[in-house]
Amino acid sequence: MAWLDKLKLKKGLVQSLNEAGFAAPKEIQQKTLARINGGQDVIAVGPEGCGKTTTYILATLNKFNYTPDGVPKVLILVPDKEKVEDVIAKISQLNKNKTLSIVPLFAAPGIEAQMDAMADGADIVVATPDRARAIYLKLGLDLNKIELLVIDDAELIVKQGLQLPVTELADSITKCQHLVFTEVVHERLNKMIAPFMKQPATIEVEETGEPQFDTHPQMLYLLPNFGTKVNLLNLFMQDEELFTKVVLFVNTRPTAEKLYKSLHDRKSTVALLNPWFFELDGFTSLQEFKYAATRILIVVNDGEQKLDLDDIPFLIHFELPIEKETYINRIINHSPNDENETMAIRFATDLELTAVKKIEQAIGQKIPLAELPEDLIVEKERTFADLAEKKAAKAKADDDAPGAAFHEKKASNAKTYNYRAGVKAKMKNKKKY
């Protein structure tokens, strides 16, 4: 009876938990449910699989008696259709109150069916932020009686650029409790939730486990954007005595070409692995690079590549590969007793922190966060307003410019005078003779 004793859940809900095989609460449930049941705003941070979804489903179902009124009491916002369906399936697994009406809202052809479902009555709404906002603006989603607003996988919602519908929906709710569940917390996420979170309790659980294998020393540089990543890379590469040999990993050819040009223009000796244009310097193997005078080799991430990275002093991941196993295979230290040490350096923005957390969980250790150099130039974050302003300025310049068919007159043909009609007539007659 651990659930009942510790967390004050309703008996029917405790019975559902036992039937579903949840013998005892997980750490995140032990730390958050009492606060949630007490009405406090909560930010819960934890890795995938730690029990975040089950936590807010329990908090949601614990609010309802057997007489729901068909007006939304709980709004749960998630990033995509798959998550909507997953949450509804888990609610159905634990919910014994069959009078509860649970309505999913997500992008689908036509909006009328979802509007009709809302009109028939909804006690719990599980939705993507953009579709919830669209139906709210069509007066199909009543927010007047919302008591609990849940934002799950909040870091993915930010990554998809859905902050605006989230904040608009939150602002439209007069008064309610707010719960945010996320794998990571960063500046962009804080900016989204700050306007509506009221003195929240931040609860964080770590489940990295035991280290699975020996790895090279690692360092993480957290940077605001791509431009600042480029600046830090160039700053590092200026130190030729330290960075004697570097393998630089990126995800795409355009990024590889951009970094190649940036480093080449700064007089760094740089090459590409298996270059795709003849004018780009390159090697066909790591072995060639190891014995060449070139200091920097740019490699486009490919999970199928088997790279011999032994004896390379620095491995810099400008971008993390899509598959975390690709990164992990590169940082395993196969010769821990060898004196020639390799340093693995990662550059990451806020939006890449989720991938970093998954790697930490897989390798069983946290990656030390490095301080940024004082002389690093931090590029300004480009916002939609900046882009709109730049576009408007360009449009104005185009409007002010001469048309495509306009040509400047030659100096000999330029008209710099204005004769009277009588003078023009005399000149015309003169030309006849």
Image: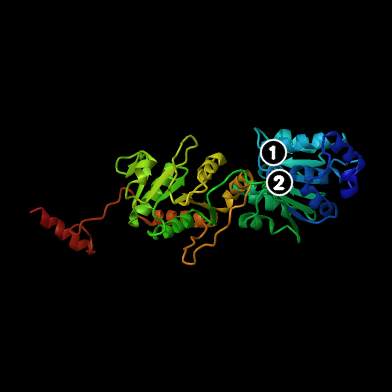
What kind of element bears circle 2?
loop
- Residue depicted at 43% across the width and 48% down the height: 312
Q: Quadrant of the N terminus?
A: top right
Which mark is drawn over residue 83?
A: 1
Measured from the top left, where is residue 57 in percent x and y? 79, 43
In the rendered structure, the answer to whether residue 184 lies left or right of residue 124 reads: left
Classify residue 97 by image quadrant: top right
Query: Which numbered disc, 2 or 1, marks the residue that appears first in the sequence?
Result: 1
Report how far apart the C-alphas of labels 2 and 1 lie in the structure: 9 Å
Measured from the top left, where is residue 106 in percent x and y? 68, 38
Please tell me which residue lies in front, 249 or 71: 249
- Tell me if label 2 and label 1 are in contact, CB under 8 Å: yes
Which mark is drawn over residue 64?
A: none
- Report the amino acid beneath label 1: Lys
The answer to whether residue 140 shows anywhere in this view is no
In the image, residue 330 above or below residue 393:
above
Please tell me which residue lies in front, 37 or 75: 37
The answer to whether residue 207 shows anywhere in this view is yes
What kind of element bears circle 1?
helix
Measured from the top left, where is residue 149 in percent x and y? 76, 49
- Residue found farthest to the bottom: 374
Q: Label 2: which residue?
A: 152
In the rendered structure, the answer to whether residue 433 lies left or right of residue 116 reads: left
- Report the amino acid beneath label 2: Asp
- Residue found farthest to the front: 337
